[in-house]
Image (cartoon, rainbow, N blue to C red):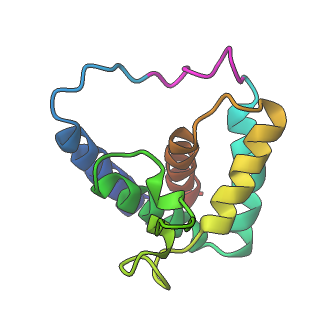
Amino acid sequence: MAARAIVVLWLILALVAIASGGASAQLSSGFYSRSCPGMLKAVRSALHPAIARERRVGASIVRLFFHDCFVQGCDASLLLDDAPGLRGEKNATPNKNSARGFEVIDAVKAAVEGCCPGVVSCADILAIAAEESVARAGR
């Protein structure tokens, strides 16, 4: 089961790498170590209880991340609600009644905002929650 989750994560990361083309930005696992040192603990504090309540939530978070990255990159646009004159991706036909776990991401975002407001992007929160979901699946 854990091996399957790791394979899925690698496939997602490969798709993201292919889609990004010639991007030259360098990723760093310690990017927020100074600006938001409590970020990972905050993510885990909201995510782990949700996964404990319903184990499939971790897979749902990974799926949200995949669907967010699938069209025009990993930008958290999947988390957008409808607004006047704009239909957000969250309620778009392909996602409506299909994609789930939004409330967990909202809780994770609130936890991160509680420890360091305005520092961590929604796109990064979604990516980190997906990574942590895969790590948690192996336990």
User: Residue 139: in sight, yes or no?
Assistant: yes
Question: Residue at (68%, 18%) from the top-left corner?
Answer: 35
Quadrant of image for the N terminus: bottom left
Position of residue 11 in the picture relative to residue 28 (left or right) = left
Tell which of 79 and 47 is nearer to you: 79
Q: Name, please, the residue furthest toward the right.
A: 114
Left-right relation of 19 to 48:
left
Q: Is residue 3 visible?
A: no
Q: Main secondary structure of the magenta part?
A: loop
Q: How many marks?
A: 0
Q: Is residue 102 magenta?
A: no
Where is residue 64? Give x, y as percent: 46, 63
Task: From the viewer's side, name the closer residue of 84 and 139.
Answer: 84
Quadrant of the drawing holding the C terminus: bottom right
Q: Residue at x 69, y 45 (%)?
A: 43
Q: Position of residue 54 (x, y in %)?
A: 67, 75
Residue range corresponding to the magenta coloring = 28-36
66 lies above or below 1 = above
Residue 63 vs 113, above or below: the answer is below
Measured as percent of width and height from the top left, residue 109 is found at 69, 48
Residue sitting at 50 percent across and 43 percent down? Answer: 123
Residue extending furthest toward the front: 85
In this picture, residue 2 sits left or right of residue 56: left
Is 31 in the magenta?
yes
84 vs 27, left or right, is right
